Image (cartoon, grey):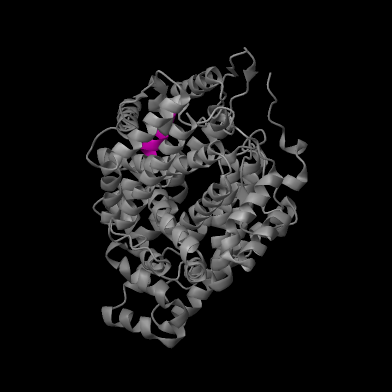
């Protein structure tokens, strides 16, 4: 039997994150939790009083203090919960602080409708009031949603449903990470390998096709057995979003989600239309993969394994550190020194353990480190994951150090730019250092996989999400059959005629947690396309482009995200950035095809 995952207690603490910088212990967190109540009461005490600039300023200051306190409590509980999703203690901590968060949102839900109930002329004068100058953009964003803000009573009621609307996502997450058990997968020699959410993709990169297929079938067999629960959970999330959109007088849940960031819906449409235009290039990539792997049939369990046999090099965590530092070196000494600090000060929770949340993320608060969770397995992809999450953490670090609290939190629309800039910088430098055609192909494979997974695949997810929400909003039923049918058809569309569509493929949607954050996934694709342009400018223009990029990261949430991207050199009001990125994918693929011919 292959090596099993360790329990959390068996890990070397040097490779776990240091949460004591937030709270010295769980007991310290417990002591701090009740301290949030006076802050909630203080903010709530302004109800009925928000009629002049001075009082509104005092309320906004009180809200900032409340949000800073509760974000620390919430973040710590969530990070502890992610360490081992099986643990009752961390689950309880998360549940209690989530309840406090909902209470805070309910207690302050009066503010926006109360301010917006003021006469139009008074609202405009607030934007010019000197005492509110620090909050001017925040107030402008509030005025933007005036037509979709409900009465004080309705907003309070809606805020009270926060935990209810979040429940579907929590149910699906707990089911997938804590409850699902997968049958072990046998390799070509008959040796069994443990299958978990954390190591599934690693198994899919194996050169042993028997292992890949058995892991694939066993993994999705379990999802199929629970597909009714996943479907009910996702249907609940979609219906919750649709109900909220209807209550707020939006035409759809997509319109509501995009309006929150001031992003026109045409950006979403441009993405899907342009990616569809470049489907033939994707089909060429699938054909190249089939040819290089020497397969008569290409199945879905063949899409992650490296194109070159024997290229599954293993990297140590120390290797990953060096490569990430190399990747960010074009961004200057100050940026690099903070990345070194991140490794040294244990911002990162490195290895998988039993019960640990799968995947990877960056999470922190204005007053904490921007922590990183990964499930490092020693693959090149694991190295890229650390580079990716470090981009998020550096975006957060720069925003926190250049913006006040209320403007530090950047929107999701720009959240994936910094992460994918790091990925682009890493792969370009690896390609420059490649000494043989085989080594070059390894990195070209990584580059092509980044495009496949971040542009094509995330756009496919976005199209699935759009179709699922539209079906619900048109009165259709989100059943296992309808959801899996939509997904299977999209797999066929996005991967083309060379791909054999196995029955298990249709259940993959159930393992995508981002679907519970409506209309988030398309931002991965638009961000990657933006980062392709930015990283190319950094490489060709040097310091002027670096300064522009670091300025963009330092803006946090102090401007509309489309405007922030323009400051960084990207205009997503047209399809040009998407088209430019996909042309680059075409060029990279052509280079890979040429290298393959050279190797034959």
Give the image location of residue 135, x and y in percent. Answer: 45, 77
Spot the residue most to the top. Answer: 190
- Picture layout, residue 264 above or below residue 131: above
User: Mostly what secondary structure, the magenta segment?
Assistant: helix
Give the image location of residue 159, x and y in percent. Answer: 42, 56
Name the one closer to the observer, 498 or 457. 498
- Picture layout, residue 417 above or below residue 147: above
Residue 516 visible in this rendered orientation of the protein:
no
Q: Quadrant of residue 486?
A: top left
- Picture layout, residue 392 above or below residue 288: below
Name the one closer to the observer, 533 or 589. 589
**For the magenta stretch, what is the residue range?**
229-236
Q: Is residue 183 magenta?
A: no
Q: Is residue 269 left or right of residue 141?
A: left
Give the image location of residue 188, x and y in percent. Answer: 58, 14
Give the image location of residue 185, x and y in percent. Answer: 58, 18
Quadrant location of the N terminus in the rendered image: top right
Q: Is residue 18 left or right of residue 413?
A: right
Residue 512 visible in this rendered orientation of the protein:
yes
Name the one closer to the observer, 452 or 366. 452
User: How many marks do you count on the picture?
Assistant: 0
Name the one closer to the observer, 452 or 432. 432
Q: Quadrant of residue 186?
A: top right
Q: Is residue 235 magenta?
A: yes
């Amino acid at each position: 039997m292959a090596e099993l995952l360790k329990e959390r207690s068996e890990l070397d603490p040097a490779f776990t994150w240091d949460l004591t910088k937030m709270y010295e212990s769980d007991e310290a967190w417990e002591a701090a939790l009740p301290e949030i109540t006076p802050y909630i009461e203080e903010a709530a005490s302004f109800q009925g009083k928000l009629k002049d600039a001075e009082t509104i300023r005092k309320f906004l200051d009180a809200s900032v203090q409340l949000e800073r306190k509760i974000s620390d409590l919430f973040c710590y509980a969530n990070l502890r919960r992610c360490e081992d999703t099986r643990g009752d203690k961390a689950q309880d901590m998360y549940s209690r602080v989530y309840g406090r968060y909902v209470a805070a949102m309910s207690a302050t839900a009066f503010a926006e409708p109360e301010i917006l109930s003021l006469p139009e002329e008074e609202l405009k004068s607030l934007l010019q009031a000197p005492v509110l100058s620090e909050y001017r953009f925040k107030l402008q964003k509030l005025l933007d949603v005036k037509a979709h803000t409900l009465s004080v009573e309705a907003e309070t009621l809606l805020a009270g449903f926060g935990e209810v609307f979040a429940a579907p996502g929590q149910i699906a997450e707990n089911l997938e990470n804590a409850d699902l058990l997968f049958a072990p997968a046998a390799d070509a020699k008959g040796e069994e390998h443990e299958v978990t959410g954390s190591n599934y993709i690693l198994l899919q990169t194996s050169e042993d096709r028997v292992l890949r297929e058995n892991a694939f079938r066993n993994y999705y067999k379990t999802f199929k057995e629970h597909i009714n629960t996943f479907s009910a959970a996702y249907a609940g999330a979609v219906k919750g979003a649709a109900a909220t959109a209807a209550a707020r007088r939006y035409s759809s849940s997509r319109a509501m989600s995009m309006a929150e960031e001031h992003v026109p819906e045409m950006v979403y449409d441009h993405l899907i239309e342009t990616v569809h235009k470049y489907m033939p290039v994707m089909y060429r990539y699938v054909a190249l993969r089939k040819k290089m792997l020497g397969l008569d049939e290409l199945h879905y369990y063949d899409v992650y394994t490296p194109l070159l046999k024997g290229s599954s090099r293993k990297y140590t965590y120390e290797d990953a550190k060096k490569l990430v530092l190399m990747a960010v070196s074009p961004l200057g000494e100050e940026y690099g020194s903070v990345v070194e600090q991140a490794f040294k000060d244990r911002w990162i929770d490195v290895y998988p353990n039993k019960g640990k949340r799968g995947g990877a993320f960056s999470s922190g608060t204005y007053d904490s480190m921007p922590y990183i969770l990964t499930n490092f397995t020693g693959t090149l992809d694991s190295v890229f994951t650390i580079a990716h999450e470090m981009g998020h953490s550096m975006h957060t670090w720069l925003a926190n150090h250049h913006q006040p609290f209320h403007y530090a939190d950047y929107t999701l629309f720009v959240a994936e730019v910094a992460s994918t800039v790091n990925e682009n910088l890493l792969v370009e430098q690896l390609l420059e250092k490649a000494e043989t055609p085989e080594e070059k192909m390894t990195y070209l494979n990584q580059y092509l996989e980044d495009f496949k997974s971040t542009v094509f695949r995330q756009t496919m997810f976005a199209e699935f999400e759009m179709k699922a929400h539209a079906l619900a909003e048109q009165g259709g039923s989100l059943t296992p059959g309808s959801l899996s049918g939509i997904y299977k058809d999209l797999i066929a569309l996005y991967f083309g005629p060379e791909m054999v569509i196995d029955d298990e493929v249709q259940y993959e949607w159930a393992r995508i947690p981002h679907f519970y954050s409506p209309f988030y996934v398309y931002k991965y694709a638009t961000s990657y396309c933006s980062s392709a342009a930015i990283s190319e400018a950094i490489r060709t223009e040097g310091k002027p482009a670096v300064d522009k990029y670091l300025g963009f990261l330092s803006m946090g949430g102090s401007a509309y995200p489309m405007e922030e991207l323009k400051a960084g050199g990207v205009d997503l009001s047209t399809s040009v950035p998407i088209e430019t990125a996909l042309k680059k994918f075409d060029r990279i693929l052509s280079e890979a095809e040429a290298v393959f011919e050279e190797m034959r």
